[in-house]
Amino acid sequence: GAPTEIETSLAKKICQLMPSIELIRMVSSGTEATMSAIRLARGYTKRDKIVKFEGCYHGHSDSLLVKAGSGALTLGVPTSPGVPAALAEHTLTLEYNNIDQVREVLSEVGDEVACIIVEPVAGNMNCIPPVDGFLQGLREVCDTHGVVLIFDEVMTGFRVALGGAQAYYGVKPDLTTLGKVIGGGLPVGAFGGKREIMEYIAPLGPVYQAGTLSGNPMSMSAGLAMLNTLTDDVNFYQNLNKKVQMLTDGILAQAKANNIGMTANVVGGMFGLFFTDSNAVTNFDETSACDVERFKKFYHLMLEEGVYMAPSAYEAGFVSSAHTDEDIQATIDATGRVFAKL
């Protein structure tokens, strides 16, 4: 398809709001966005290997459906039928929030790594925020070894802050992927970043990317309307954060009243609930060590109460501006009744 004026308007709006994005390319899904960003990073650096983190989901392209074996430098192995082992060998999967491991690995193979791709707030092993220094450490190690840093903000973009997680934490990636919010509920994706890297895409550069329905006018119109809504309401994120805090504080209080071990993670409009006696959950292994079976029972009992929570112990929860204080309180009250049955 051909570009439209509304696509240009949305592109300019995103570039104004996201700290690291100088140029942006629209696509049709988050998977397309991450796939294209990785291809661009490989073409720009002329390297093949990529680094991702266990528990982070970046779409269903072949390079990203990979989990590393034991040991930091063990070659990746596919986690889905249909992914060639030879392709998986180029993907290294490390532990989220373990910057020392990243430094160790890149000290050995940094000159072979094209990019590090990361969810700045992990939302696919429940909600796991970065520990202090993790994102800053990734920025530093990428600069040291000439590696492209990609923030997958498909989930966090415009959800945790107006400028995404990169604005929230004050760390600029080289490339950013977006989706979800920027389509206002319609199919969309985008990737953008530094001009010198983005100009490596055809027709200005040699890296190929195309899509007939990329930047389709319906998605662009819905996305622009959404971002205008967010920028017009100066108290939007403050109000959203209050609702999330009210919800998680209330649920934790109900859990304590029923002698149930639980902790919560909160970042902006995202939250995670963990059935555990631990005070902190910071990576995939710690999420897996929580009581996943109890979460399943909790989920189904909440459905009986008429409340739809995240359907898995590995999925983050979200609050929106449409949720009223009455909705939040009704949810808290429902958890009290459910916890009494657990």
Image (cartoon, rainbow, N blue to C red):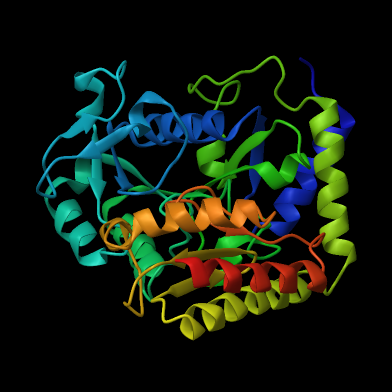
Can residue 218 be seen in the rendering of this structure? yes
> Relative to 335, is 5 above or below?
above
Q: Is residue 114 left or right of residue 165?
A: left
Quick one: quadrant of the C terminus?
Answer: bottom left
Residue found at x 55% / y 79%:
254
Quarter where residue 336 is shown: bottom right
Q: Position of residue 253 (x, y in %)?
A: 55, 83
> Relative to 179, is 103 above or below?
below
Quick one: quadrant of the N terminus?
Answer: top right
Q: Residue furthest front?
A: 341
Q: Position of residue 107 (x, y in %)?
A: 15, 55
Q: Position of residue 151 (x, y in %)?
A: 48, 51
Quarter where residue 319 is shown: bottom right
Q: Position of residue 158 (x, y in %)?
A: 68, 57
Nearer to the camera, 281 or 237: 281
Can residue 119 be seen in the rendering of this structure? no
> Relative to 322, is 276 above or below?
below
Q: How many marks?
A: 0
Residue found at x 81% / y 35%:
220
Q: Is residue 223 left or right of residue 255?
A: right
Residue found at x 35% / y 37%:
45
Nearer to the camera, 291 or 127: 291
